Image (tube, coloured by chain):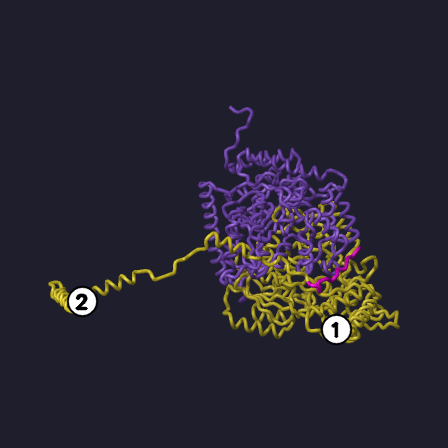
Chain colours: A purple, B yellow
Amino acid sequence: MIAIPYLTALTTYFSYGLLFAFGQIRDLFRKVLDWCRSNNLQGYAPICLGLEDFYIRRLYLRIQDCFGRPIASAPDAWFDVVERYSNDNNKTLKRTEKKTRCLNLGSYNYLGFAAADEYCTPCAIETLKKFSPSTCSTRVDGGTTTLHNELEECVAKFVGKPAAIVFGMGYVTNSAILPVLIGKGGLIISDSLNHNSIVNGARGSGATIRVFQHNTPSHLEEVLREQIAEGQPRTHRPWKKIIVVVEGIYSMEGELCKLPEIVAICKKYKAYTYLDEAHSIGAVGKSGRGVCELLGVDTADVDIMMGTFTKSFGSCGGYISGSKELIQYLKYTCPAHLYATSISPPAAQQIISSIKVILGEDGSSRGAQKLARIRENSNFFRSELQKMGFEVLGDNDSPVMPIMLYNPAKIPAFSRECLKQNVAVVTVAFPATPLLLARARICISASHTKEDLVKALEVISRVGDLVGIKYFPAEPKKEHQE
Amino acid sequence: MASSFTNMADTAIEWLTMAFEAPFAQAVVFGVHIGGHLFVEGLLLVVILFLLSQKSYKPPKRPLTKKEIDELCDEWVPESLIPPLSEEKQYEIPVLESAAGPHTVVEGKEVVNFASANYLGLMGHEKILDSCTASLEKYGVGSCSARLCYGTIDVHLDCEARIAKFLGTPDSILYSYGLSTMFSAIPAFSKKGDIIVVDEGVHWGIQNGLYLSRSTIVYFKHNDMESLQNTLEKITQESKRAKRLRRYIVVEAVYQNSGQIAPLDEIIRLKEKYRFRVLLDESNSFGVLGSSGRGLTEHYRVPVSVISAGLLIDSSCGYCSLVLQVDKIDIITAAMGHALATEGGFCTGSERVIEHQRLSSSGYVFSASLPPYLATAAVTAIDILEKSPELIKKLKENVAVLCADVFSSDVEEVSFRDTFSNLGVEALHLIGACWRKRLSDIPGLSVASDPLSPMVYLVLKNSTGSVKSDLQLLEDIADCALKEHGVLVVTSKRSILDKCRLPVGIRLFVSAGHTESDLCKTSKALKKASEAVLSGHN
């Protein structure tokens, strides 16, 4: 867990308080001015209530230029960021034709498949000509092609499970699977920092939801014991089934899940495990097979494994893999399979080609090189940042590293200063993270070279000094120190 | 014995009289004569107070011991993760071996494809393939990021601007998947306490969005305007005209589950009378209805939003101060996986509506953006649609011909194109409507969809009573049509999570790329297949 220093907490609260106060004063003026001007809504309630988007209007709009920056090239290691300007104090941003070449530390491009690849792109273009960009139908109607079947076999083999089912979008995978597997009378125990898609899927299922402390197996055990003993709320009948949902790598913390302990606890208490490997599949593990391989967990112990293809495979879509019966059941009942358009054929081909490259089946050793490079890059970058005195989260081997900022004013400062020096970073604030714990999140890719990383470190160090986020004392340099 | 008892009683009485005659018992305080009885009453009061102050009896709490919890955990047996698969669910899915255009290859044979919603026949179009190839070479396949974290590529912004320009609205927002469009848009605008009136035949995406929004949901009978009016009347009477209460009507333009078309002019009249906002899902009507394909709004000649020169929309304040009339349709969503032959979805409306979704819509913020080549495909498709509106006309003709079904096996060459090419689209609809009655030639099946709908929906004339057996019969018909006659049609399958109770049927997605012989072959095949299956069943 992150322990925020007292002084920083105080200053952060003060900053937010000030912004809040200013926002309220402006709202007051707005109310007064609107009361004078006639309100022409003619009896309709306003479509967005004033209180709901106070944060958006008064806080987010001030720093809107740090988010949603458009790019004009592939999200590779270096890309073109389009410049925007605003005439009305950041309320609306207009595009210009000018572009700046920046180093990309923000895209999820772990293995470097984002841009046109020498093996994958020709295959994708061939598939495009054969199957056209979309199948225009659902999987059960006319949307299953031989390519889709091949893809599912390929994914199942890669992940290490008997069968797999593929959907066109990762978010919908979580939202549409959980309601099918569990309903009223069931219990979902999820990690407190799980992704929004899991939360949505859990809510949509109608089951009771309990949360356990982030990555703390002992608390999970406590919650399980308590819940099994008590049973359903109010009726105290025993639960129909219990599913524990965890993620492989948490995207806001960069931490790996403590999978062996959690799986052992779930086995002991007969709960089902659901592992969401959105960020870890393809990026960690000796052969890229994800967090199970890295931590030595047998894939047969995890009941349902889910993942997405957006991050490491440079494509789009999500998958679920499990036993043959489970996948067959899902094929008859899951709404995303029955009602949603099937995954686009070129995207499917990209996944197959990238899996072939990772496993070395295309005849080259590029896959192994990429995996080794991302591991080296992540570890090097993290250790250097820590030496400089930044507060960096995450475990070793994880390619996601958040740098803590805390203060709301440091968010735009860090982002804009880095952009001026041609380094593009992503900053995250409330509501994706807790209010006080704003951070800048860096994603390392296998396509970053050593020089790129060294340049990034220089720029971040300079900006860090300027903005004042080196919360820990820097390690003294080994040479030339008196 | 008795004497000692009397002695004790005597002493007790002596003590009492002494107490009564004690000085304080006869004291005079504030002019009130205190008698001895007050002393006893005072004692009683003390005793009562003492009893009241005691806690009432509760059985002591005994939390479960560790051993007891262990035993309970050992005893508990969960259900299996999935219920056992029953025999009826073993239907086969057709596996295509080529693009899902008007003709496709299944198991080595070429079949006529009525299973893809490729309404305008844009699948495999040269221009779209060229633009996608250029996009793939420039941007790669995926966008690798969420929209707010460098996932916004310039093609996305171009696509949004193009859609907004095409429909005549201020702005639009792009989603990366058709299904997630509605179920992310609804919870962004409707929360606990708001009221939504929705048709009972909407598809699962909308149902899920309604459930996630936690608002009060009221269903009205499928496409029945009287039922809608009664529902609206009831709701307005029940709830006070709360200023903060948002009220919505959610309808689809062409219903996925039945092929009916919503009467938009009626809905707008009701909406303006009762002050509800309208959410319209145009997945199956975008690019199909209206003379230039702009959807149901063009078909009914309703302007989506009215913009005038003196407009002042203050998007910074929470109180909408529009200086002109409220939009006729507040929010329009559509999935692009139908007429535009690409993937993804979009939502369009006023600027306020779109800006709000960019930060509050979970399917937009927490998900990766649409792959750039699909956005390019969408832009090219809209360009083609604008330049060649004859595709829409061809589609309408095809639908009319299919429903008409006047071909008998003897007549080979009756060309509808020659006979009716000079007639307007309205005339074609009339003719098609007259001849729809002829579809009773197909034994056992009748057309349940609207004549204008690009998706022809056939239902069983005599339902067997249970959805499962109906579906089984329809599956058999579809199977027979595919295997013996080379026509690929599909049944409407329902998920266990779907709340829709409309009858199941066979869907035919008509495309502008189908030729007359295709349509002829299909109607013959359906006749033969349903004869074979239904006679065998009866």
Q: Is residue B310 visible?
A: no
Q: Residue at x 69, y 44 (%)?
A: A114
Q: Residue at x 74, y 49 (%)?
A: A349
- The residue segment tinted magenta is B86-97
Pointer 1 residue: B446
Residue B517 x/y as whole percent = 84, 66
Q: Find residue B38 and name its label.
A: 2
* Near-viewer residue (A118 or A95): A118
Please give the name of the residue rendered at 55% of the width and 33% of the height, measured from the top-left corner: A387
Residue B237 in picture, x, y percent from top left: 52, 73
Along the line of sight, the residue nearer the viewer: B365 or B457: B457
Label 2: how many residues lie within 10 Å, few (<14), some (14-19) or many (20+)? few
- Three-letter code for the amino acid on which mark 2 is drawn: Leu
Q: Quadrant of the N terminus of chain B?
A: bottom left
Q: Residue at x 44, y 40 (%)?
A: A7
Q: Quadrant of residue A204?
A: bottom right
Amino acid on which disc 1 is placed: Ser
Number of numbered discs overlaid on the protein picture: 2
- Decide if residue B58 is on the left or right side of residue B446: left
Real-space Cα distance between discs 1 and 2?
Answer: 98 Å
For the stretch drawn in magenta, the main secondary structure is loop
Q: Position of residue A267 (x, y in %)?
A: 58, 50
**In the image, B528: left or right of A45?**
right
